[in-house]
Every structure is written in C-alpha cells, then in structure tokens.
Image (cartoon, rainbow, N blue to C red):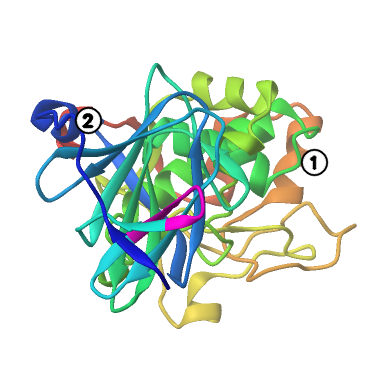
Amino acid sequence: MRIRKFLILGIVLLVQFVCTLPCFAIKIGLLTGVGRTSIGTSTQGQIINARTNKLLYTMNAMKAYELKPYKRTIAIKISNDYFDLGTDYVIIRPSFGGFISAKMKWYRGFLIVYNRGGTLTVINNVEIEDYIKGVVPSEMPSKWAHEAHKAQAIAARSYALSNLGKRANSGYDLKDTPEDQAYGGASAEVAGTNKAVEETNGIVLIYDLKIIPAYYSASAGGQTSSSGDVWMRNLPYLKSVPSFDDNVKKNGHGVGMSQHGANNLAKNGYNAYQILKYFYKGTQFARINPDYYK
C-alpha cells in the first residue's frame, strides 16, 4: 500500500468542539476488526485527531472516503492515494446538524474510528434518544400499533441504559445487532416510531430503584419463560406469563416482553404502560436524570 504523510492544513484548536459531548450518549459498535471502511457525511465534515483535538481533514459533503489501518495509525484514501493521518484514533463529525455514514447507512451523532491491533473498530457515539429512534423500527415493524412502539421504546431504552459498558473491552457499550439490540441508525427511522420515542422521552422501567435490563423477544409461542428457566438466574420481574402470541411460532429466548404479544395487546386497547407492567412484574416507571450520565 502506498502511503503518504498527511499534511495538516489550517490547524484549528477544537478542544471545546470535540469535548462537548452529548449529556448522556451511548457508544454503539458498528464494525469490529475490519480491514477497511467507507465513511462520509451529508454536510461538510471534519476528521479530528481525538488525541490532540486538532483538525486533520475537511470532508466534502456526500462523498465517500475509505479508511484503513496503516501500521499503528489510520490512513485515508483521497483521489487515488492513501495518506497517513498520523494517529490511531479519529473522530468524524458532520457540520450543521448533518448525518454520518458507515455500513451504507446514515447515523446521527458522530463516528469514532480506532486502529486496534491492526484492524479498525468503528463506533457511533449518539445521544440515547436518537439511538432509540434507530432501534424501535429495527426491532419492531413500523406498521404495528403505536402503543406497542411506545412499549418497545421504553423497553429498549431500559435495556440500553442498564447495559452501559457491557462491551467496554471492545471500546463501546453495545453492538448494533440483535445480539444486543438491532440498530439501523437514522436510515431506519420512521415518523411514527420517532413519535413513539418522543412521547416516552427518558422513561425507563425500574425495579428496586434500578433500571432493569428489559429483555424482550419476537414471540414466546403462547407463554413467556422466566429468566431462571433460560439463564439460571431468577430475576423477580421476569416471570412466566401468557404471552398473547400463541398464533405465532416462538422466536427468540421468550423472556420478558413478547413483541407480537405487545402488538396484540395494543390492538385490543392496552396502552404501553399496561403492556409493560404485564410483562415485567413489580416494575415501576421513572424518567432518567440526564445529569446522572454526564
């Protein structure tokens, strides 16, 4: 690979710009251990050396750029040449409220890219509520009942906040796959599911004054499973109950909320809070304090 030294043109001190992060953001792993990745921004973007807070390169809007590991740093392809960015850790941020792209999708927030042991890790740093907007339509069909979407938003938010740091060894909190929660970024967003997220802004499920990991699955086949039957850990709020989805084959671990069951209950007049109280026994609702996550 032909690598040229990258010239830092028009260096700007961006300490406040880089360090003023969202009050309560989450880091979502988009790619781990890859040999290259394509990134871009919908508006003019900046590549910033996260270790020095210095501007490395100004990106053109709506143009794809290839990044790949180079020894212990990261190289960027411009025209037909690769240039060494001189750091193993960069932030890619759009300007003017734009979006960033990776994995052929658009995301809110900004990207973090590391060279970790000779491969790249790509992370979306995004505000919690914007993250949930990308989760709800990825986990539940957007044409389903609105109250089911609200229940999904609260469950997803609870799961995320109770699992912050779950994958810290990889440099982020959660994966963007159903192994944690499916997350399609801004590309997945739909007006109706965004409304469900906004109507439940900051609301989580708690038990004994702690946010619970609100496990859910597509369907339980008529009866949910208690957590102890699946994971040999009895959680008092995850009991076996009729799942109201016996018209659907079981799909998933069957613990906690059945998504099909939630939709069926919503279509029969139950609201999101009644649905969640049914599937998560003895829980209460709380609104998170953003200052706690600063």
- Residue 146 location (% of width, % of height): 70, 26
> Viewer-proximal residue, 69 or 218?
69
Magenta residues span 75-81
Task: Tell me the quarter of the picture where residue 273 sits.
Answer: top right
Residue at 13% over, 40% down: 53
Tell me if residue 78 is in the magenta stretch: yes
The amino acid type, in three-letter code, at marker 1 is Asn
Residue 115 is situated, as x and y percent measured from the top left of the image, at 30, 67
Residue occupying image coordinates x 11% and y 27%: 16
Q: Is residue 88 left or right of residue 29?
A: left
In the figure, 209 relative to 227: above or below?
Answer: above
View extreme (right): residue: 247
Q: What secondary structure is the stretch in magenta mostly built from? A: strand
Where does the C terminus fall, quadrant-wise? top left
- Residue type, label 2: Cys
Location of mark 1 (residue)? 264
Q: Residue at x 40, y 69 (%)?
A: 2
The picture places residue 288, in percent across and down from the top left corner, at 29, 32
Q: Which residue is mark 2?
A: 23
Check the image and name the residue furthest to the bottom.
232
> Would residue 109 be visible to someone looking at this image?
yes
Of residues 73 and 285, the one drawn nearer to the viewer in this rendering? 73
Nearest to the observer: residue 209 or residue 36:
36
Q: Position of residue 73 (x, y in %)?
A: 25, 66
Which label's residue is closer to the chain start, 2 or 1?
Answer: 2
Q: Is residue 201 within the magenta segment?
A: no
Is residue 122 or residue 87 the one in the foreground? 87
Q: Residues within 10 Å of mark 2 (few under 14, many from 20)?
A: few
Say which of marks 2 and 1 sits in front: 2
Element marked by disc 1:
helix
* Mark 1, other Cα within 10 Å: few <14 / some 14–19 / many ≥20: some
